[in-house]
Image (spheres, rainbow, N blue to C red):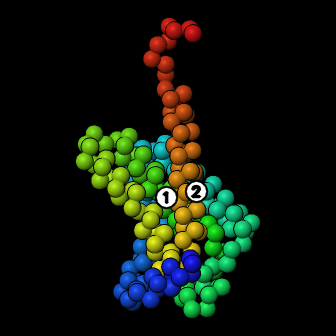
Amino acid sequence: MEAEIIRFLQANASVGWITLFQFVTLFGSYLGFIIVFAILFIRQRKLSYTFAVTFVIASLINQVLKHLIMRDRPFVTNSDIINYGNEDGYSMPSGHSLCGALYATFIFYHILSTSRHTSTKVLGGIFCFIFPFLIAYSRMVLGAHYLSDTLVGIALGVAFAVIAIVLYRIYIKKSKPSDNINNKS
């Protein structure tokens, strides 16, 4: 059934759409990392370091999972699916989808923690919700991943980001001087 989704997407994609999704998918890789790191570095330097470490750890664990699961990419097991992404290696989980979700979660946290405007938070939230699914969609159109690969990637990306942000918040809270030094409880 998952191969049918990819076949449908590829059958209904023009050359222009394929080119567009080849561009979109770049935002789920190092290009996205550079953009998010730069934004965070300028605005919340300690958060940018947390983001970078999380990216490295998540990427390494993603590679370990790919080699443990060893699921072939859709174009390997289905000769009629085209590899528009010029990919190799294993399929599960999708690293681009993982990164897209990781990037979006960190950016959403940044927006929530720095913006005073509700409209910015709402629009940022909508963008950050749609972004990883757009990356996931691009991975399927390009024939690089099945739907389940992308959904697992998104779930892992959000999980890694949430854990990292919680640890970051604990660290920030503990590193601030106590508001009440005289309280000895």
Residue under the image location 57 percent in, 92 percent down = 80
Mark closest to the chain's N terminus, 2 or 1: 1
Question: Element type at marker 1?
Answer: helix
Q: Are marks 2 and 1 in contact (CB under 8 Å)?
A: yes
Q: Is residue 148 above or below residue 173?
A: below
| Most distant residue in the bottom direction | 80
Image x and y of residue 130, in percent: 39, 61
Q: Is residue 120 above or below residue 134?
A: above
Q: Is residue 149 left or right of residue 181?
A: right
| Most distant residue in the front direction | 1
Label 2 – label 1 distance at C-alpha: 8 Å
Image x and y of residue 22, in percent: 45, 79
Mark drawn on residue 101: 1
Quarter location, residue 18: bottom left
Q: Quadrant of the N terminus?
A: bottom right
Image x and y of residue 181, in percent: 50, 12
Q: Residues within 10 Å of mark 2 (few under 14, many from 20)?
A: many
Q: Is residue 116 left or right of residue 161?
A: left
Residue type at the position of mark 1: Ala
- Marks counted in the figure total 2
Q: Quadrant of the C terminus?
A: top right
Residue beneath disc 2: 156
Residue type at the position of mark 2: Leu
Question: Element type at marker 2?
Answer: helix
Q: Nearer the viewer, residue 170 or 97?
A: 97
Mark drawn on residue 167: none
Quarter location, residue 14: bottom left
Image x and y of residue 57, in percent: 63, 54
